[in-house]
Amino acid sequence: MKELILARTSKATKKSIDSIQSIKHLRKGLSIYKTGRSPFWFIRLRDPLAGKYIVRSSKEISRLDAIETAHEFADNFRSKANSEFAQQKVTSFEHYAKLLMASQKGKSKWSDGDGKLLNRQKDGLIVYFGRHDVTKITTGMVREYLLHLDDNRDRPLAQSTKSKHVVIIRKVLSLAVEDGLMNQLPLMPKIKTVDTPRHAFTDNEYIRFSKASLECAERGDVVRGVQITTHHAKMFKFIVHSFLRPTGGELFGLKHKDIQSHSSPNYLEMNVRGGKTGQRTSVTMPLAKALYESIKTPLEWPNVDPEEYVWMPEYPNRTTAINTARRLFNHILKVANLIDADRKLSPYSLRHYALQSRLRSSHGKVNIHTLAQNAGTSVDQLERFYLHKMAPTPEMIENLHFRGETKPTPILSSESNDHLSFEEHDED
């Protein structure tokens, strides 16, 4: 019993000796303190990068001398460990990144995409560059960041995605140039990108897909608890005749209030609010109007809620609607025997098919500028991604073989003033 009491007393005495007897806070993250074990003051400095405190003996008995030593140690430590980091928050990358997000909020179509890359928890731009002084960011540091992105993944990041990161870095640093903090932007690493256009349906594949979608609806096929109906079959067909992207900003963001129906010619006029290239007014082919008007009964139309989504309105969360639609699409592909590892078809393939078939069925007379504008893209993107793998039409072959006897038909002519034809697709 006596030994136990002595042990406890010894432990309490040791704790008393090691405990802080006096402490002086000098500035944020820096203080000096004294214990009963040593006559010297100790320096305690917070290392924000390591997320821990650095403790050193000041070797000073005098508090005033210890304070001077502490400030000197802190200044030297920061200059060695954090030479690339901003001494003031207003010169940091994080400061200008937040200015960029604030300036783009609600105004720029890139706002959400930029915000995601800036704020990624694991390897976002703010996590990596946030504390850096914008004037200290060099080409080499950007290149190291791109390598860092690959190191965090099983497979290297796509070159196009890396380009987006570089573009955002330029945007952030450009704000610092505007403030006069920098004279010019550092050179950015050149990233070679290769266009990888999605595969489009062929005429035969689209007919098979449309037929399979109706067969699935008639049987009532169920995919992860969701039954395929004619509503879904019409929805996929609507993509082809409206040129909409199968995304939450376009097809799945479309509400009844965004649509006006026209006759002579028959078409829908759509207010596409959340498109990839911003808000636009777009018109459809004739069959899209018939598809739209068939999703409600004559008795339902007078009472339709203008705020209701047109397609799959039972899902308030549009991300859920998109994911569900993709699963139904893949099921229909399987039924139609269109699963091919070398030619992976997706809902986007319907949009690609729509743009290609519009040019083919118009015999090349449709104005490519009008088509691009109506689809919410550019002529450059249309040629690089949507028409890149389009098979030549007989008219294009005839033009290629032209010897001068007759004037060839202009294919993809940018001089034509013709607008979108509203003739219905041959296959429909």
Image: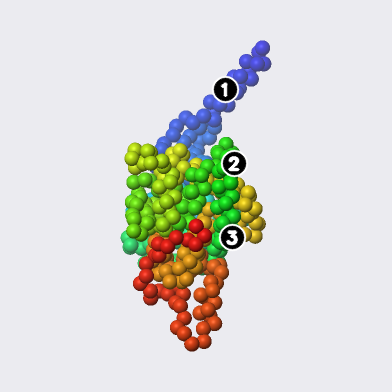
Q: On screen, 270 above or below 355?
A: above
**Which callout, 3 or 1, points to the residue nearer the camera?**
3
81 and 171: which one is in front?
A: 171
Tag 1 secondary structure: helix
How many badges with numbers are in the image?
3
Q: Check disc 2 and give the amino acid type.
A: Arg
In this view, the residue in front, 384 or 333, is 333
Image position, residue 34 (x, y; %):
48, 34
The circle drawn on residue 326 is none
Residue 404 placed where, x, y %?
Answer: 48, 87
Q: Name the residue at 40% across, 62% down.
A: 422
Q: Which residue is mark 1?
A: 12
- Which image quarter is the N terminus in? top right
Residue at point 33%, 51% (across, down): 260
Q: Residue 115: percent from the left, percent from the top?
A: 43, 51
Circles 3 and 1, Cβ within 8 Å, touching? The answer is no
Q: Residues within 10 Å of mark 1 (few under 14, many from 20)?
A: few
- Disc nearer the start of the sequence (3/2): 3
Q: Which of the 4 image quadrants contains residue 3?
A: top right
Residue located beneath label 3 in the image: 204
In the rendered structure, which amino acid carries the disc numbered 1?
Ala
Front one among 92 and 11 = 92
Residue receiving disc 2: 219
Mark 3, secondary structure of its residue: helix
